[in-house]
Image (cartoon, helix red, strand yellow):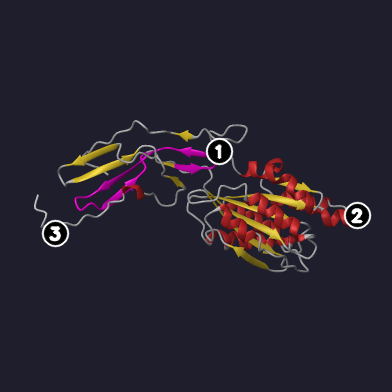
Amino acid sequence: MDTSANTNCTRLNLGKVSLNNVSERKDKMRLGMTLTSNPKDNSFVTCGPLWSYECGSSYYSTGICSRVNESFKFSKTISPAFQRCETYMDIMIVLDGSNSIYPWYEVRDFLINILQKFYIGPGQIQVGVVQYGSRVVHEFTLNDFRSVEEVVEAAKTINQRGGEETRTALGINVARTEGFKRGGRKGAKKVMLVITDGESHDSPDLQKAMEDSKADNITTYAIAVLGYYNRRGINPEAFLKEIKYIASDPDDKHFFNVTDESALKDIVDALGERIFSLEGMNPNGTGFGLQMSQAGFSSHIVEVSL
């Protein structure tokens, strides 16, 4: 070999092979265990059969393959058996922040606790929050954050906006028409969570708001906080009827009521379980681990190829 010749070597970094918009796990994916060359164009396909991605608490090991051209550039990457997660959801939380909510920290703690139940990340859950009273404010949008830790930190900074009125229909409409469009994803299941402590001041608008939500295929969970009523000895019958109307059918799956703000923490687990469930999930909430493993797969070059 002529050591005087100029030679340049560039690291290919095959280990950086990735798919966009998934919560992937690349450690120990065994990239190169399958390697197939194409003499027609001097390209080759390399695969990592144990590449996996997260869906809730389960890992789906479908494997990943990349085509590398004759210039040693990646031209395409696929996961042969990739399936969309059951947790592919856009969730809008509609939070009553009117003056009657007290104490606010109990509501904020509930928000933090329920967010910690969600599998937030690329290809899984996105969360946005609007707070309403007399007006509506976007606290953060669906694509502002990409991890549970980021969303929780943002929730800790949400302060009560206040307001003399509880305009629930307005809050729902803003979440539907604006919230789901700010970072919403095509094909994601739309879920709305409404938390309020009193009858709406814009109740004539509720029927249209809920009809529009249903038409947009939004599943709505509604929580009635009875603290204001219990503190003043007021009959909550009309309020509960309104919140049941807001909740999607059937009520026993989508409607909750708690005695006061401090009791919100008691429904976190049940609410989280109802909002989503995973195929292959054990009753105790643990996943199977490596699902759909492709440890033995191989690749072959055909006329219509990767």
**What quarter of the picture does the C terminus occupy?**
top left
Q: Is residue 37 magenta?
A: no
Q: Which of the two marks, 2 or 3, is nearer to us in this view?
A: 3
Q: Is residue 62 magenta?
A: yes
What residue is shown at x 30% (from left), y 49% (from top)?
A: 76
Give the amino acid type for the residue marked by disc 2 in the picture: Gly
Q: Residue furthest left?
A: 2
Mark 2 or mark 1, which is nearer the start of the sequence?
2
Mark 3 or mark 1, which is nearer the start of the sequence?
3
**Mark 3 lies on residue:** 6
Q: In this rendering, does residue 148 appear at all?
A: yes
Mark identifier at residue 278: 1
Q: Residue furthest front?
A: 3
Q: CA distance from mark 1 to mark 3?
A: 56 Å
Q: What segment carries the magenta color?
A: 53-80
From the top left corner, tell me how far across and down residue 127 is, in percent.
Answer: 58, 55
CB atoms of marks 2 and 3 within 8 Å: no
**Mark 2 lies on residue:** 233
Q: In this rendering, does residue 17 appear at all?
A: no
From the top left corner, tell me how far across and down residue 44 is, in percent.
Answer: 23, 44
